[in-house]
Image (cartoon, helix red, strand yellow):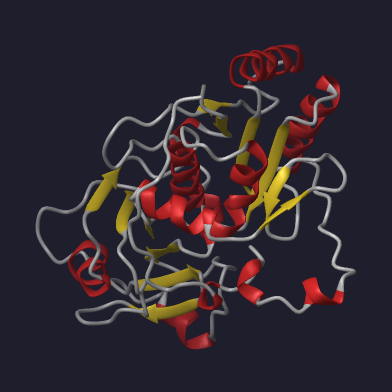
Amino acid sequence: MPIAIAVTSSDLVLPPPGGPVPEAAVLRPPEEQPLETAVTQATLLLDQCGHLVVPYPDSLPAAYVRRLHTVRSVLESDRVALLPVALPPLAVGVLARQLRQLSVSDLSPGVLASAARLLTHYIYAGAQLASVARCDRVDVGLGAHVGSLVPGTRFGVLVNPARRLLRTGPGETPDGPGFATRMTVARSRPRPRSGEDWVTDTLAPGWRVQGVQEILPLPADSRRWWGTHRAVEFAAAIPDPSVLYQLVTSVRREECHWCGLELIGDRCGFCSAPVPRTDPAVAARPAHDAVGAPATTMSPTPTPVRTRFATR
């Protein structure tokens, strides 16, 4: 039985890039679902799958975050991992899809939950915006603010793994991934039949993505995240579950001193306990052993390997 993966909005349940992938459970905000129903839903997921992993945007409204923690507290369960992710909504959906792909492998619940931080380093996320006047995700200079007033001006904003703002046009692309990715694109409105589309016609070829998947509509929370409803959001990520598996299994594993679960990186995904670093020999180990380390300290060109995928 796969580990249960849940998201906080139905528009974050993205179709798989290929092959069967377990569906994600959809949790509801407090204004749409009574607490009793939310607790019952979580109980059923735990009974069916044993553990529940919930990645959610760190921009999620405070009331919704409190609801998630309340449900976990009511259940008195250490089998629920709540993972705030500093990515745009579409990229959170892409990350959740990767976790869904890995949920049918032989990874333990603790490793799968803590792997979310590792995988975020390999997601290139951003958007094309018609205006950056209300965008607070990157530094916006006076020239860009003035440019937002000019009809037809478009801006490219990259927020992960690095932040950059540029005016879009033919041949204008930020630095992209040095490994094979597939791009997911979500729009606030259908693509025009005529004219060049910067994301699919310039950015995707410039990054040499293996394919583009179009999603309609734009995730509901994206409008608030980007400060505008006129956005084309994109996320380029590794689509191959065997490569994802290789990345996760190549990182040194630890045992959480608090809850006892196996994990990777410097923090448990379930109880949030940090990994003690009191041993000088441990502290001197390479930085790539830590999930929170920059992607540049890890292998920049992951390659497919044979993996042990088995139904739980």
Observer-nearest of 214 and 101:
101
What residue is drawn where x is 24% and y is 68%?
Answer: 198
What residue is drawn where x is 79% and y is 31%?
Answer: 78
The answer to whether any part of residue 229 appears in the image is no
What residue is drawn where x is 56% and y is 74%?
Answer: 138
Expressed as whole percent of the image width and height from the top left, the position of residue 84 reads 67, 49
32, above or below 67, in the image: above
What residue is drawn where x is 61% and y is 25%?
Answer: 28
**Which residue reaches farthest left?**
194
The answer to whether any part of residue 239 appears in the image is yes
Report which quarter residue 278 is drawn in: bottom right
Report which quarter residue 288 is drawn in: bottom right
Observer-nearest of 308 and 103:
308
Number of numbered discs on residues:
0
Expressed as whole percent of the image width and height from the top left, the position of residue 30 reads 70, 26
Expressed as whole percent of the image width and height from the top left, the position of residue 294 reads 58, 74
Expressed as whole percent of the image width and height from the top left, the position of residue 82 reads 70, 40
Task: From the viewer's perspective, tell me whether residue 293 is left or right of residue 93.
Answer: right
Task: From the viewer's perspective, tell me whether residue 287 is left or right of residue 248.
Answer: right
Task: From the viewer's perspective, tell me whether residue 157 is left or right of residue 280.
Answer: left
Task: From the viewer's perspective, tell me whether residue 52 is left or right of residue 186.
Answer: right
164, above or below 253, in the image: below
199, above or below 191, in the image: below
